């Protein structure tokens, strides 16, 4: 009988070499032992030693059809993870909604739940998070017995090690020990992560980042966020803050950001700033949908406001690329559906400020649903388990 607890215990007690072997299989499988040895920098004997217990507890399978690996002798047996060996929950916290998913080990969605938030007060959000977890567990049915991890992502400055949301302007939180609160409420450990960093982890392990040396994700919407993947790793920063291009001081000091500081990119380019600027000019409160419609119909103020936002975002991306040198920038977020309003001036500003060969960095759009953001949360939990980060 398959015992999920044995699989979790094996991963938690794995050596660095064994963890690297499992990560290769998880992110690159189906993959041969020879290729694992090459990628992990290990001997084939070390790979074989690490693989045997992974197969024994049902985390990895070598039952794919054998194929020749180009070497004389016996055929290779490619290894791949058993996706439904374990289940993780990933939850994205928005200011007005909680979005949760249950996934397998490859972040394939098994169940999902969305519920509105009528307040960002901590008690209200924690109640909603608990309800989301219980709902996902119910939807999983018998597979709930394989649940191994829960991760929650929030916008802002998040101390992942301590599980503390140090600052989230969108939520209006400061120094909130969210992981401890949720762990006590749910009776199981909960990982708390920055939402854009989690999205980057998801792309790094299960998306565009597989086999890509370096990339950045820039999200445009209520906030302007960024995640960095450089030299095969997601950049987390010494203090858990890295890639915060939304708070680069690239605009006028008379523009106040939701974070309370002045001159931030987000103070001009975030959705609330765009809506406020156009609403002020038209003398009435507008929704983002109305502002987008005005811009598409050629309203001078709306067009100018989007152009201004696009210019500062393009400048911020050029700054990021000049500093970190990614080969690819992926633009996502809820505003990517209206990228036509940003694109021309964003690319022009990037081209103007990118230094030398940095200008060769490709900028592409990739729509992300909020379920994708929640999958990123699940990916961060899977990474912690697979890399034995505690």
Image: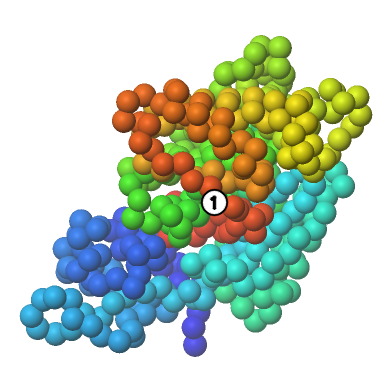
**Observer-nearest of 51 and 198:** 198
Disc 1, SS: loop
Circle count: 1
380 relative position to 63: left or right: right
Tell which of 68 and 358 is nearer to you.
358
Residue annotated with mark 1: 366
Assess disc 1: are there few (<14), some (14-19) or many (≥20) residues with their C-alpha within 10 Å of its C-alpha.
Answer: some
At x 73% / y 74%, what residue is drawn? 138
Write the residue at 38% across / 31% down.
359
Q: Nearer the viewer, residue 280 or 130?
A: 280
Position of residue 48 measured from the top left corner of the image (x, y, whole percent): 23, 72
Can see residue 287?
yes
Residue extending furthest toward the front: 298
Residue name at image x 70 percent, y 25 percent:
304
Relative to 18, residue 172 above or below = above
Q: Quadrant of residue 369?
A: bottom right
Image point (25%, 72%), residue name: 32
Q: Is residue 9 left or right of residue 356?
A: right
- The answer to whether residue 160 is seen in the rendering is no
Residue situated in front as seen by the camera: 245 or 252? 252
In this rendering, position of residue 176 left or right of residue 110: right
Residue 122 lies left or right of residue 53; in this view the side is right
Q: Position of residue 156 (x, y in %)?
A: 63, 36
Q: Position of residue 342 (x, y in %)?
A: 61, 36
- Locate residue 279, reporting x and y percent: 84, 28
Q: Is residue 132 above or below residue 343?
A: below
């Amino acid at each position: 009988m398959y015992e999920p607890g044995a699989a979790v215990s094996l991963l938690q007690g794995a050596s660095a070499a064994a963890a690297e072997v499992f990560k290769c299989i998880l992110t690159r499988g189906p993959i041969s032992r020879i290729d694992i040895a090459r990628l992990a920098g290990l001997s084939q004997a070390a790979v074989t030693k690490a693989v045997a217990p992974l197969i024994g507890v049902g985390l990895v399978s070598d039952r794919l059809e054998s194929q020749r690996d180009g070497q004389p002798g016996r055929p290779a047996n490619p290894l791949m993870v058993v996706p439904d060996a374990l289940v993780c929950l990933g939850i994205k916290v928005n200011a007005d909604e909680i979005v949760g998913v249950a996934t397998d080990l490859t972040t394939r969605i098994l169940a999902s739940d969305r519920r509105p938030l009528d307040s960002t007060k901590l008690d209200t959000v924690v109640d909603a998070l608990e309800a989301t977890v219980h709902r996902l567990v119910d939807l999983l049915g018998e597979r709930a017995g394989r649940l191994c991890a829960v991760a929650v992502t929030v916008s802002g400055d998040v101390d992942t090690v301590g599980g503390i949301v140090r600052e989230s302007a969108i939520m209006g939180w400061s120094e909130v020990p969210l992981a401890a609160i949720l762990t006590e409420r749910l009776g199981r450990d909960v990982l708390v992560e920055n939402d854009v960093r989690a999205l980057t982890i998801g792309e790094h392990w299960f998306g565009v980042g597989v086999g890509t040396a370096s990339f950045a994700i820039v999200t445009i919407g209520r906030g302007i966020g960024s995640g960095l993947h450089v030299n095969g790793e997601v950049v987390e920063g010494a203090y858990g803050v890295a890639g915060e291009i939304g708070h680069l001081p690239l605009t006028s000091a008379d523009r106040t950001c939701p974070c309370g500081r002045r001159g931030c990119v987000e103070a001009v380019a975030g959705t609330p700033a765009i809506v406020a600027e156009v609403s002020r000019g038209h003398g009435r409160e507008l929704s983002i949908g109305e502002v987008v419609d005005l811009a598409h119909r050629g309203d001078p103020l709306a067009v100018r406001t989007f152009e201004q936002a696009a210019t500062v975002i393009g400048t911020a991306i050029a700054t990021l690329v000049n500093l970190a040198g990614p080969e690819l920038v992926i633009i996502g977020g809820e505003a990517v559906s209206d990228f036509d309003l940003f694109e021309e001036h964003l690319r022009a500003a990037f081209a103007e400020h990118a230094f030398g060969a940095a200008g060769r960095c490709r900028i592409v759009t990739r729509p992300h649903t909020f379920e994708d953001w929640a999958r990123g949360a699940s990916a961060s939990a899977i990474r912690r388990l697979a890399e034995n980060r505690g």
